[in-house]
Amino acid sequence: MNFPIDVLESGAVVLGTEIVCDGFLSDRRVRIQSHIHDDHMGGFDTSKGFQDLYMSEETHNLLLVEFNADLLVRDNLHPLPYNRSTRAESSYFRLLPSGHMPGAVQIEVQLNSGMRVGYSGDFQWPLDEPMEVDALVVDSTYGSPQSIREYTQAEAETRFLELVFAKLKEGSIHIKAHRGTIQRAVQLLGGEIDATVICSSRLASEISVYQRFGSSVGSVVLIGSDLASSAVADHRYVRLYCKGDKSPDQLPEGTMITLSAYMARRDDPVLEYSDRAYRVALSNHADFLGTLDYVRATGAKYVVADNTRGHGVELAQAIRERLNIDARPSTNSSSHEWGAG
């Protein structure tokens, strides 16, 4: 059977002959945006002028924060609630939460033939509702058998809080993470620490979107405000760094904590570079075993493993050998970037 799914050189994900996800394709009138991380925003400026764009309501609001003046006047952006069946050309699709960050979705498409194809987007595992499809494009960020974590995310969260509590006694805390993960850190810290949490106005605007959609993210204080300046002078504060925020090359005092499972240890969520620099494997991505569990849960009979980060070949082989499901890597070549959380 011919399953019309793939990931192209541009990173665009093809689902059938009418829909593209996370990229621009000139012969597709419909683009579905899985979430707002930069590595999924390829060709977005072009798409705004030529395609109908569909996304979750949270993603729409986060895009307004980033492109406010432009997107507010456009009528080709369509925010949708989860699980609503929506027609696009001759196909129907629905968006299901992927657990990766607020607004991030799995994309399930029913083609005119009746075949169901889907794109996982970036996803966490376990999920309350994995989509059910015949053919699947699956994210392979942690698609290598080497990417197995011998600890739970609950354990990683506990170790992160323990580290923050301990290092606050010595000075300020500086936390660097991708979108979604940084808000998760603020949520964990809320009500747990006696310190001012400081961030840029851009990040504060994003946090307000999460709060509006029911996320219990704690309060933050803007850089440059009187309260922030007082906390900085006392060296008792937590400073957040996310997209658009330049983190310092060298801290005059305090501790830097990077939140990412990329290059993390298999057996310990905390990697210590020095007594003032750490990496904690707080991740909104499924690891290798979680990815296999997700594939199994979708019921897919055919799988394309996204090869964008170079693990598509390994993951496709594992899916064939361990799950006995027909699988291949996507046709795009690999590129290696800093892990997306």
Image (cartoon, helix red, strand yellow):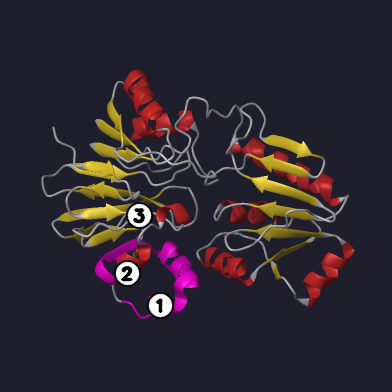
Element under disc 3: loop
Label 3 crowd bin: few (<14), some (14–19), many (20+), radius 10 Å? many
- Quick one: label 2 or label 3, which is nearer the N terminus? 3
- The three-letter amino acid code for the residue at tag 3 is Asp
Can you identify the residue that label 2 sits on?
A: 48
Say if residue 309 shows up in the picture.
yes
Q: Which mark is residue 70?
A: 1
- Work out whether residue 300 can be spotted: no
User: Compared with residue 211, is residue 188 higher up or lower down, i.e. above or below?
Assistant: above
Query: Residue 243: percent from the left, percent from the top?
Result: 57, 60
The reply to whether the C-beta atoms of the residues labelled 2 and 3 are less than 8 Å apart is no
Q: Quadrant of residue 322?
A: top left
Q: Could you say whether the residue bearing mark 2 is in a helix, strand or loop?
A: helix
Question: x%, y% of residue 275?
Answer: 82, 40
Residues in magenta, as a range: 47-74
Say whether marks 1 and 2 touch (CB < 8 Å).
yes
Residue 82 located within the stretch drawn in magenta = no
Residue on which disc 3 sits: 22
Q: Amino acid at mark 1?
A: Asp
Q: What amino acid does circle 2 point to?
A: Lys
* Res 42 → quadrant: bottom left
**Disc 3 versus disc 1: distance between alpha carbons?**
19 Å
In the rendered structure, which disc, 1 or 2, sits on the residue that comes first in sequence?
Answer: 2
Residue depicted at 60% across the width and 26% down the height: 150
Q: Residue at x 77, y 42 (%)?
A: 162
Asked if the magenta segment contains residue 57, the reply would be yes
